[in-house]
Image (cartoon, rainbow, N blue to C red):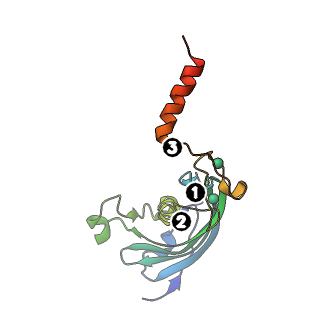
Amino acid sequence: MNESSAPVRQPAGKPYVLDVRAFGRRPGTSTQVHRTVAAPERIGVDLVGIDAGEEIDLDLKVQAVSEGILVTGTVSADTTGQCARCLGDVSGALNLFLTELFAYPDSETDKTTDDDEMYRVEDDMIDLEQAIIDAVGMELDLDPVCSENCPGLCQGCGERLADLEPGHKHEVIDPRWAGLAKFASADGEDTK
Ligand SMILES: [Zn+2]
Ligand SMILES: [Zn+2]
């Protein structure tokens, strides 16, 4: 393939959309895109994700191939969430490698794939938003922890064990006696 470069334009007000008309569908034509965009919504789940409005750094190669536009490169952003063990706040960073083909309409790939399997080039434009949301969703660590040895929560009182005195514990009542204890208090307080 002959490597040549052509500019991509960005339609006003659409930070995730790239206009690749200048590529003229010539395979090998490519450009580098370095851009910081704002997350359009919280991406991820409550436990871990990129906050709405958070900066997402894109460092991408956008390249025409025979079947469409191939986008490869890194997507990075800070993440926020909760420790899966103690529910404390956790902040982190996500750095993923994106590889996504946007098929040309009327290409073989376009004809042989469903809409939900493959992104498309539409009106000589590609929209990275959903591709990034999907890639981030697959990359997120769904069990974030505040520290590798986070002890989690006390089973007895629900407090973070890391915040409690060493050796913190509760009197454990044997369940067989718990039943009797209930009778005892009922006898004592409710004598109607
Ligand atoms: Zn924790
Ligand atoms: Zn406790």
**Mark 2: secondary structure:** strand
Quarter holding residue 47? bottom right
Residue 51 in sight: yes
At horizontal 64% and vertical 62% (from top left) the residue drawn is 146
* Mark 1 or 3, closer to the camera: 3
User: Hey, what amino acid is under mark 3?
Assistant: Asp
Q: Do residues under tags 2 and 1 come within 8 Å of each other at their CB atoms?
A: no
Residue denoted by label 1: 85
Give the spatial CA distance, label 1 vs label 3.
26 Å
Distance from Cα at disc 2 to Cα at disc 3: 66 Å
Classify mark 1: helix, strand or loop. loop
Q: Residues within 10 Å of mark 2 (few under 14, many from 20)?
A: many
The label nearer to you, 2 versus 1, is 1
Q: Where's residue 8, x and y in %?
A: 56, 71
Residue on which disc 3 sits: 174
Q: Nearer the viewer, residue 126 or 176?
A: 176
Asked whether mark 1 and ligand 1 are closer than 8 Å, the reply comes as yes
**Mark 1, other Cα within 10 Å: few <14 / some 14–19 / many ≥20:** some
Residue that numbered label 2 is attached to: 18
Q: Position of residue 74 (x, y in %)?
A: 56, 74
Amino acid at pointer 1: Arg
Image disc number at residue 68: none
Pinpoint residue 39: horizontal percent, then vertical percent: 60, 56
First in sequence, mark 1 or 3: give its number. 1
Against 188, is 166 above or below? below
Residue 42 at x, y percent in the picture? 58, 52
Quadrant containing the C terminus is top right
Q: Secondary structure at mark 3?
A: loop
